[in-house]
Amino acid sequence: MKSILFLFLVLATVIFDVSADVYFEQPLSFGTIVIRDNSIQSSVTVPTYGHSTSSGQLLIIKPGQAAEMVITDYPPYVDLSITPMLPVITTVASGDTEQFTLSEIYIEPNIRTDSAGMAMTQMGGKLMTSGNGKHYLNTSYQAVFYLDISY
Protein backbone atom coordinates (compact mmCIF):
# COMPACT_ATOMS: atom_id res chain seq x y z
CA MET A 1 0.00 0.00 0.00
CA LYS A 2 1.53 3.29 -1.09
CA SER A 3 0.45 6.31 0.95
CA ILE A 4 0.60 9.88 -0.22
CA LEU A 5 0.45 12.82 2.14
CA PHE A 6 -0.17 16.35 1.01
CA LEU A 7 -1.57 19.69 2.07
CA PHE A 8 -4.28 21.39 0.12
CA LEU A 9 -5.27 25.04 -0.11
CA VAL A 10 -8.05 26.64 -2.10
CA LEU A 11 -8.06 30.23 -3.25
CA ALA A 12 -10.95 32.20 -4.71
CA THR A 13 -11.25 35.12 -7.07
CA VAL A 14 -14.40 37.19 -7.07
CA ILE A 15 -16.15 38.77 -10.03
CA PHE A 16 -18.19 41.90 -9.34
CA ASP A 17 -19.15 45.17 -11.01
CA VAL A 18 -18.73 47.56 -8.10
CA SER A 19 -15.78 48.72 -6.02
CA ALA A 20 -16.43 46.01 -3.46
CA ASP A 21 -13.75 44.01 -1.70
CA VAL A 22 -13.63 40.35 -0.69
CA TYR A 23 -10.95 38.79 1.46
CA PHE A 24 -10.45 35.63 3.46
CA GLU A 25 -9.73 35.68 7.18
CA GLN A 26 -9.09 31.93 6.74
CA PRO A 27 -8.72 30.23 3.33
CA LEU A 28 -10.52 26.98 2.59
CA SER A 29 -8.17 24.11 3.39
CA PHE A 30 -8.68 20.37 2.92
CA GLY A 31 -5.90 19.64 5.41
CA THR A 32 -3.50 16.71 5.06
CA ILE A 33 -4.85 13.57 3.46
CA VAL A 34 -3.65 10.15 2.30
CA ILE A 35 -4.82 8.38 -0.84
CA ARG A 36 -4.42 4.65 -0.32
CA ASP A 37 -5.55 3.65 -3.79
CA ASN A 38 -6.68 5.84 -6.69
CA SER A 39 -8.42 3.03 -8.59
CA ILE A 40 -11.81 4.30 -7.38
CA GLN A 41 -13.00 7.89 -7.09
CA SER A 42 -12.70 9.14 -3.50
CA SER A 43 -13.44 12.46 -1.83
CA VAL A 44 -12.89 14.69 1.18
CA THR A 45 -15.56 17.14 2.32
CA VAL A 46 -15.04 20.19 4.51
CA PRO A 47 -18.45 21.48 5.64
CA THR A 48 -19.12 25.10 6.51
CA TYR A 49 -19.58 24.00 10.12
CA GLY A 50 -18.56 20.69 11.62
CA HIS A 51 -15.96 18.02 10.94
CA SER A 52 -14.32 16.94 7.69
CA THR A 53 -15.36 13.59 6.23
CA SER A 54 -13.87 11.33 3.58
CA SER A 55 -15.07 8.54 1.31
CA GLY A 56 -13.50 5.73 -0.66
CA GLN A 57 -9.74 5.28 -0.37
CA LEU A 58 -9.01 8.77 0.97
CA LEU A 59 -8.06 9.16 4.64
CA ILE A 60 -7.85 12.37 6.65
CA ILE A 61 -4.58 12.82 8.57
CA LYS A 62 -5.13 16.45 9.59
CA PRO A 63 -8.63 17.90 9.12
CA GLY A 64 -9.14 20.91 6.91
CA GLN A 65 -10.87 24.16 7.80
CA ALA A 66 -13.77 26.03 6.28
CA ALA A 67 -12.96 29.44 4.83
CA GLU A 68 -14.04 32.62 6.59
CA MET A 69 -14.95 35.12 3.87
CA VAL A 70 -15.48 38.84 4.48
CA ILE A 71 -17.30 40.98 1.91
CA THR A 72 -17.09 44.77 2.24
CA ASP A 73 -18.00 48.00 0.43
CA TYR A 74 -21.42 46.94 -0.79
CA PRO A 75 -24.53 49.05 -0.17
CA PRO A 76 -26.15 48.59 3.26
CA TYR A 77 -28.88 45.96 3.70
CA VAL A 78 -28.72 44.37 0.27
CA ASP A 79 -29.06 40.68 -0.48
CA LEU A 80 -25.96 39.30 -2.17
CA SER A 81 -26.28 36.31 -4.46
CA ILE A 82 -23.12 34.15 -4.44
CA THR A 83 -22.52 31.59 -7.18
CA PRO A 84 -19.33 29.50 -7.36
CA MET A 85 -18.08 28.67 -10.86
CA LEU A 86 -17.16 24.98 -10.74
CA PRO A 87 -15.75 22.38 -11.27
CA VAL A 88 -12.09 23.38 -11.08
CA ILE A 89 -8.98 21.22 -11.52
CA THR A 90 -6.10 21.68 -9.07
CA THR A 91 -2.54 22.69 -9.91
CA VAL A 92 0.89 22.10 -8.35
CA ALA A 93 4.03 24.26 -8.41
CA SER A 94 6.10 21.52 -10.04
CA GLY A 95 5.97 17.83 -10.82
CA ASP A 96 3.99 15.45 -12.98
CA THR A 97 1.06 14.30 -10.85
CA GLU A 98 -2.58 13.40 -11.08
CA GLN A 99 -4.87 16.31 -10.18
CA PHE A 100 -7.97 16.68 -8.02
CA THR A 101 -11.30 18.22 -8.90
CA LEU A 102 -12.90 20.83 -6.67
CA SER A 103 -16.44 19.71 -7.39
CA GLU A 104 -18.52 21.63 -4.85
CA ILE A 105 -18.39 24.79 -2.77
CA TYR A 106 -20.71 25.04 0.22
CA ILE A 107 -21.74 28.61 0.91
CA GLU A 108 -24.97 30.40 1.69
CA PRO A 109 -26.27 31.35 -1.77
CA ASN A 110 -27.81 34.57 -0.41
CA ILE A 111 -26.47 36.70 2.41
CA ARG A 112 -27.41 40.20 3.55
CA THR A 113 -25.02 43.05 4.15
CA ASP A 114 -25.18 44.99 7.41
CA SER A 115 -25.53 48.75 7.93
CA ALA A 116 -21.89 49.25 6.87
CA GLY A 117 -22.32 47.22 3.66
CA MET A 118 -20.36 44.27 5.07
CA ALA A 119 -21.15 40.55 5.26
CA MET A 120 -19.30 37.52 6.59
CA THR A 121 -19.84 33.89 5.68
CA GLN A 122 -18.27 30.45 6.00
CA MET A 123 -17.31 28.40 2.93
CA GLY A 124 -16.71 24.66 2.70
CA GLY A 125 -16.15 22.35 -0.23
CA LYS A 126 -15.73 18.89 -1.70
CA LEU A 127 -12.55 17.61 -3.34
CA MET A 128 -12.57 14.50 -5.58
CA THR A 129 -9.79 12.19 -6.77
CA SER A 130 -9.74 11.06 -10.39
CA GLY A 131 -10.21 7.36 -9.61
CA ASN A 132 -8.22 6.46 -12.72
CA GLY A 133 -5.36 4.59 -10.98
CA LYS A 134 -2.71 7.26 -11.64
CA HIS A 135 -0.51 8.46 -8.77
CA TYR A 136 -0.53 11.68 -6.74
CA LEU A 137 2.72 13.30 -5.63
CA ASN A 138 3.43 14.19 -2.01
CA THR A 139 3.06 17.97 -2.52
CA SER A 140 0.76 20.94 -2.02
CA TYR A 141 -2.15 21.30 -4.43
CA GLN A 142 -4.03 24.52 -5.11
CA ALA A 143 -7.28 25.38 -6.83
CA VAL A 144 -8.30 28.86 -7.89
CA PHE A 145 -11.99 29.30 -8.51
CA TYR A 146 -14.32 32.21 -9.17
CA LEU A 147 -17.29 33.46 -7.18
CA ASP A 148 -19.92 35.54 -8.92
CA ILE A 149 -21.33 37.98 -6.32
CA SER A 150 -24.27 40.08 -7.43
CA TYR A 151 -27.07 42.07 -5.85
Image: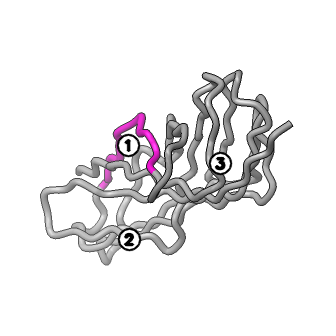
Q: CA distance from mark 3 to mark 2?
A: 19 Å
Amino acid identity at mark 3: Pro
Residue at image location 61% in from the left, 22% down from the top: 132
Quadrant assignment for the N terminus: top right
Which residue is found at the position 56% from the left and 45% from the top? 125
Query: Which quadrant holds residue 17?
Result: bottom left
In the picture provided, is 145 more to the left or to the right than 38? left
Going from N to C along the chain, the mark reached first, 2 or 1, is 2
Residue 80 falls within the magenta-colored stretch? yes
Please tell me whether the stretch drawn in magenta is mainly helix, strand or loop: strand
Q: Amino acid at mark 2?
A: Tyr
As rendered, which of 129 and 112 lies closer to the eye?
A: 129
Residue that carries the numbered disc 1 in the rendered image: 84
| Distance between mark 2 and mark 1 Cα atoms | 15 Å
Give the number of the disc on residue 47: 3
| Residue at 46 percent of width and 65 percent of height | 69
Q: Which residue is mark 2?
A: 23
Q: Tag 2's secondary structure? A: strand
* Position of residue 117 measured from the top left corner of the image (x, y, whole percent): 29, 71
Q: Residue at x 49, y 56 (%)?
A: 10
User: From the viewer's perspective, is residue 129 above or below residue 136?
Assistant: above
